[in-house]
Amino acid sequence: MAERSFAREVEDLRLGDGDTFRGEGILAITKALLQSGVAYVGGYQGSPISHLMDVLADAKDVLDDLGVVFQSSANEAAAAAMLSASVMYPLRGAVAWKSTVGTNVASDALANLASGGVTGGTMIIVGEDYGEGSSIMQERTHAFAMKSQIWLLDPRPDHECIVNLIEKGFELSEFSNTPVMLEVRVRACHMHGSFACKDNVKPKHTIKDALNNPRRDVNRIVLPPAAYEHEQEKIKTRMPAAVGFVRDNKLNEWMGPKQGKVGIIMQGGMYNNVIRALQYLGLSDAYGNTQVPLYVMNVTYPVIDTEVAEFCLDKEAVLIVEEGQPEYLEQAINTVLRRRDIQARVHGKDVLPMGGDYTAQVLLGGVREFLEKTEPRLLGNRPPAPDAAPVLNHPAIEKLKQVVPARPPGLCTGCPERPIFAAMKLVEEELGQHHVSADIGCHLFSILPPFNIGATTMGFGLGPASTSAFNVKADKRSIAVMGDGGFWHNGLTSGIGNAVFNKHDGVFVIVDNFYTSATGGQDILSSRAVNKRRDTNNSIVKAVKGIGGQWVRQLDRTYDVGKMRDTLKEALTTKDEGPKVIVASSECMLNKQRRVKPLMTKAIKDGIRTVKERFGVDEDVCTGDHACIRLSGCPSLSVKQLDDPLRDDPVAAIDNSCVGCGNCGEVAEAAVLCPSFYRADVIHNPTGWDKFKSRVAMAVIGWLQRRRDRRRPALEALA
Amino acid sequence: MRDETVRLALPAAGEATERPISLAIVAMGGQGGGVLTDWIVQLAENHGWVAQSTSVPGVAQRTGATIYYIEAMPPLDGRKPILSLMPTPGDVDVVMAAEFMEAGRSILRGLVTPDRTTLIASNHRSLAIGEKIAPGNGIADGSAVTGAIGIAAKTEIIFDLNALAIAHGSVISAAMFGALAAASVLPFSRDSYLNVIRAGGKGAKASIETFEAAFDQVKTGAAEIAAPAQAKQAVASPATPDPDLAGLIARLNQELPEPVLAMARAGLKKVVDFQDVAYGTEYLDILRTLHAADRSAGGGARAYAFTEAAAKYLANAMTYDDVIRVADLKTRAGRRARIESELEMSEGQVLQTTEFMHPRMEEVMGMLPASFSRWLGAQPRLRGWLDRRVNRGRRVRTYSLPWFLALYVVGGMRGLRRRSLRHAIETAHRDGWLKAATEAVATNYQLGVEILQCRRLVKGYSDTHSRGLSKFDRTLAAIKLVERRDDAADWARRLREAALKDSAGKELDGVIQTIKTFA
């Protein structure tokens, strides 16, 4: 069960001729795949393409009607290898992942696929996680496309254009026997827009047809001498075919006036922001009616030499708008112009920044500088462009910079990973700091305050492998953290298997929260939910033991901070040799609440006895030292200023969003912090026995309280 | 080149003025920014406009700061406008901030500018982790945001949208939608906003009520937000006012100067509540001595700041957190009433609470008579044996009779307190601290005050308490090094503030190192 239900969006996948789709970009892409007659789809979730995987997972009926096979791949390499179905058979297939991280993982399969070439159209949807809001290293997928010779589509951020390019992309793939990548940036994926739908297309050739009629051709397999042939084929056959197709089908677009002294060449994805920048300069209206000739490369690889030459031929200068580095397009275009001795000067990264988002503001500066250098008359009387600098330079705003606190992402309220790191903190206090390798997933938030745990992160599922050098006898052992998602993605072999084989003495903590939570709560092999279409409930512990792990501890309630701490201590100090593997399991609270909350509300409504738990702080017991928060960071655990002249510091306070996970109390107890925390159990629809017990106890308690209150001095006189 | 072109006075090449309406929603993950975004898009589309929204789900949505961006514009002769995917600083019509510091952040991003931006912001705070983990008070200063808004925003609509939403049983997105409607930036009627919510179905009733309340709040400024219900005070009224206490109050009013009366009354109340009237007498006795020192140091010219600080921190020092106090507080009637009101419990529900206690032998020994306790401390084996029996986490069901009785008995052991080891330790520590302060105030008035205020460093239980004490001791030792300097008070303040910055005391050590370089 994913974090979000896409039951409503699934209905959009059924739209046909005459309907208008309105919604998120990534869902428009999903619909476009069905309109293109794909026979199979796979991929691995991750922002910004998770919703593609989620909506297809919820769309069983639609896919069954069309005869489309959908797989949640084990990782991106598995997804890329899936495309081999299109090598020999005229099957259209698509896979999706987060890039460049997913493309890194998939590279081996992609390179093999691209070498032998494809018969059926294959499309790789890459969510280009670049720029603000990205969670990964800043790189370009462009490099992968060039090195393996996979065509790269970079459509304008417009649903109509994206959908059209997907349909054309499959044709291009088939026409040139080459896989195609569609690059969509984060914001384009989550962009709301609309397009006119077409009917979905059933695949002409199905997977079943292929299975029943197997084919093979040794020339398609990457092995000498075929591999050498492939390279020649790429150069002599496939590339010219692709260039011809792109040109003939006008996949790249020419906008604005035919003639001009200067022009702008851009990646399709940059179009909207370029138009906005031109608008600020008075060179375009809001509808894209531009005064400057534009060449929009919806296909960024291959570069269509003849089109570039034609565009530049009568120009004195061109500006290349290409986000990210290195500047592959600028280099390619320079080569085109030099070879043909076309004299247009090429500007690009000289007036635009080498790295980072090309926002409208950044482009405004770059385009203005370009025009000032080449054709200042175009700038006319220079209408005032938006400029926040006067405000930002104001002393009061300068002062604000010191005030506004950073707000890094963190673990959710009630997250089961919090007590694991609280326990690690407690162990650190006792046994000193250790080398900790972190991994990719929610647990990576451990590197931020308040935990500040984790030295490196080397990639998904590679936390354990990144401690592999620390395999010597020393006073301390290395600790590696990995999530269940990373474990099944590759960590079982690269991490645990590697440690077993090399007799690594370190500690390996596997954080098992029943889903790939960071990507939106998708099911995996060890998910505890029953999923009719997938085989879940496969034990991580069994897998670890199966691969040779001897010292394995399973904790079924991570919130038991004391036990977690003791287990970690044991793992760090035991004389047993080989990897010490701790599997810490509790359900992702975000998903649990989504599952449990409606059930609880219904139970209370139906008059069934229900106990609701919540934590609280006795404000007169709390001394305001905030040690509890330094071991928690829970969003529901905050501080508040008391209305008491004797108190300087705010006290801890728990708000209504508390889900009663128990971490606060467990930490206070295990760390011997303070007795301020209490758990309040409210029994809804109590039984007669509940009420009776409470009434009797409270009668006695009330009597005792009144007795003591009578003996207290009456302090009202001092109030 | 630029000057030349300006002189040419060429007209702008095209119409640059016609731009879409742009709205940025700055929020934290999980605040419903996505719902609000969808509503605004729907609203614009219902009027035949082209609307585009973008957001960045992913890690930022896990409680981090995030931004949603919307542009909308009518089509022209069937042509769709080309809309941008990110806000441009200086070119945003409406910024909606779902939290006050996020409003500040939007200003720092340049999204709020005086020529065009209407800022709709909730002035409630959701504290960032950095504000919460400081051992002292790390809460950011909201007035800096208020000041910045006055400079940056063209129009401002600032109130507690969150409280309003909660009061109407909904979430902040509905309140913000109402405020947006009332702001009249978009040329759409109030009804068309409501239609969008109605079409949503689920939860529409509460959303509409919240929308309307927010709308009215902006339009009239009159509709006050319902304050959260005050905790019921269920304290049993005493039979008669205590004559001994009345005597103390009279003494307090007579012996202390006007500026410190309020603080001294609060202090006296806390001390008597902690122990008894006799303890209150001790408090006033000490305070009288300190006040005499204050007077002879010329405190009259300084509104008796020394006495006031003494009234405050002496009360805190005398009411140290021991097992008896905790047990007493946990068993009071008012405590249960407060929890019930916080949980908004209704008739027919049953409450039970569980305390998470981890007593150690240290706490037990602190309660025992001083001489016996010291003897026990000298018997490591017996002490260790006892500790193994005591020292473990205990889940205490407060309102079950056996546990309540146990707490009640402990809470009633005040009679033992003044003979206990803990009391002896606390008193000795207190005396040393007051002596240092009294000595200082005679020669450097402000330094005396600063030393009193260092008491703030001592807080918490068990290890946290020891760490606090150690910081206190280090701070006082460092003050000793500079006490003869004119700027000693400055250094004392700097030391104290550094000690409150982090728990390990790294900042404090830094300041001490600095002092050692010249002292």
Image (cartoon, coloured by chain):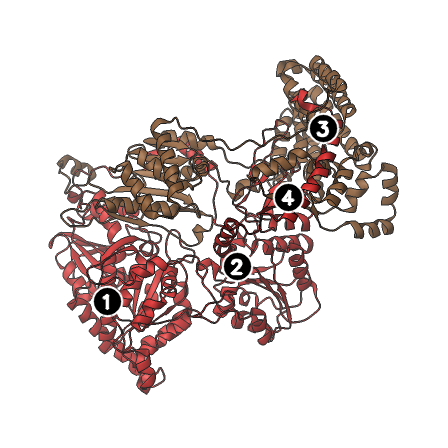
Q: Nearer the viewer, residue A68 or B504?
A: A68
Mark 1 belongs to chain: A
Q: Position of residue A407 (x, y in %)?
A: 47, 45
A205 over B3 or under it: above or below:
below
Real-space CA distance between mark 3 and mark 4, rounded to the nearest whole angstrom: 22 Å
| Secondary element at tag 1 | helix
- Measured in 3D between alpha carbons, the distance from the residue under mark 1 to the one under mark 4, in whole angstroms, is 60 Å
Specify whether A686 is left or right of A210. right
The mark closer to the camera, 4 or 2, is: 4
Residue closer to the observer: A717 or A575: A717
Q: CA distance from mark 1 to mark 3?
A: 79 Å
Q: Tag on residue A456? A: 2
Q: Secondary structure at mark 2?
A: strand
Q: Is residue B467 visible?
A: no
Q: Residue B503 appears in which quarter of the rendering? A: top right
- Identify the residue under disc 4: A677
Which chain is disc 2 placed on?
A
Q: Earlier in the sequence, mark 4 or mark 2?
A: 2
Q: Looking at the image, which residue sits at the far front?
A: A688
Q: Which residue is mark 1?
A: A167
Cβ–Cβ below 8 Å for labels 4 and 2? Answer: no
The red one among the chains is: A
Q: Cα distance, mark 2 to mark 1? A: 42 Å
Quadrant showing the C terminus of chain A: top right
Tell whether label 1 touches label 2 (CB within 8 Å).
no
- Do the residues marked 3 and 4 share a common chain? no
Numbered disc 3: secondary structure: helix
According to the image, label 3 marks what residue?
Answer: B273
Callout 1 amino acid: Glu
